[in-house]
């Protein structure tokens, strides 16, 4: 599969899951899960968009911003797993496995992306467009 096709798939899948999150918010059901879906999968769509349309919109900041959003999404899922683990007992993987995974995702996606953002903002040359756009 080409890079462009993969990016378009990321936009479509991320957008669909984000729409499910919006529907949960609109219906007033599972609001926390709705926000988790919107942040994590909205970030997936953002990454796909930044690859299909390089040099537009957020430019080089798109990936670290998407990483922060993915970290927030992982954090929300960790919160849900910790506060109501029985809700996820029917899952293929039990909460005892998913909680550490989501916490690691929150730390590495969120924390790592914040560090990258700070470094990029300190080094303004990294934000200047290159020859590719």
Image: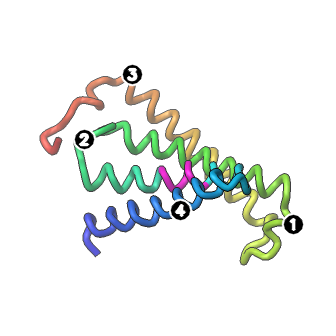
Which dot marks residue 122?
A: 3
Q: CA distance from mark 4 to mark 1?
A: 23 Å
Tell me which numbered mark, 4 or 3, is placed earlier along the sequence: 4
Q: CA distance from mark 1 to mark 3?
A: 45 Å
Which residue is at 68% across, 59% downward?
101
Quadrant of the rendered image containing residue 88: bottom right
Q: Is residue 29 above or below residue 2?
A: above
Question: At which x and y percent is residue 10?
Answer: 40, 63
Residue where numbered disc 1 is placed: 86
Which residue is at 38% across, 60% downward?
11
Tell me which numbered mark, 1 or 3, is placed earlier along the sequence: 1
Tell me which numbered mark, 2 or 1, is placed earlier along the sequence: 2
Badge nearest the viewer, 4 or 1:
4
Left or right of residue 119: residue 87: right
Alpha-carbon neighbours of circle 3 within 10 Å: few (<14), some, or many (≥20)? few
Question: At which x and y percent is residue 105?
Answer: 61, 52
Q: Is residue 103 above or below residue 6?
A: above
Alpha-carbon neighbours of circle 2 within 10 Å: few (<14), some, or many (≥20)? some
**Depth check: 11 or 69 in front?**
11
**Depth check: 70 or 18 in front?**
18
Question: At which x and y percent is residue 52?
Answer: 26, 55
Which dot marks residue 56?
A: 2
Residue where numbered disc 4 is placed: 17
Tell me which numbered mark, 2 or 3, is placed earlier along the sequence: 2
Left or right of residue 22: residue 97: right
Which residue is at 56% across, 51% downward?
38
The part of the chain drawn in magenta is 37-42
Label pair 2/3, CB-CB below 8 angstroms:
no
């Amino acid at each position: 599969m080409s890079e462009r096709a993969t990016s378009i798939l990321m936009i479509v899948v991320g957008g669909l899951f984000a729409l499910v999150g919006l529907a949960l918010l609109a219906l007033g059901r599972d609001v926390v899960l709705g926000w988790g879906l919107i942040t994590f999968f909205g970030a997936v769509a953002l990454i796909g968009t930044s690859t299909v349309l390089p040099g537009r919109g957020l430019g080089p900041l798109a990936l670290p911003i998407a990483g922060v959003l993915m970290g927030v999404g992982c954090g929300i899922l960790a919160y849900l797993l910790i506060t109501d683990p029985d809700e996820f007992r029917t899952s293929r993987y039990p909460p005892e496995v998913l909680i550490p995974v989501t916490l690691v995702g929150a730390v590495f996606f969120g924390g790592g992306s914040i560090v990258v953002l700070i470094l990029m903002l300190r080094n303004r040359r990294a934000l200047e467009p290159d020859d590719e756009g």
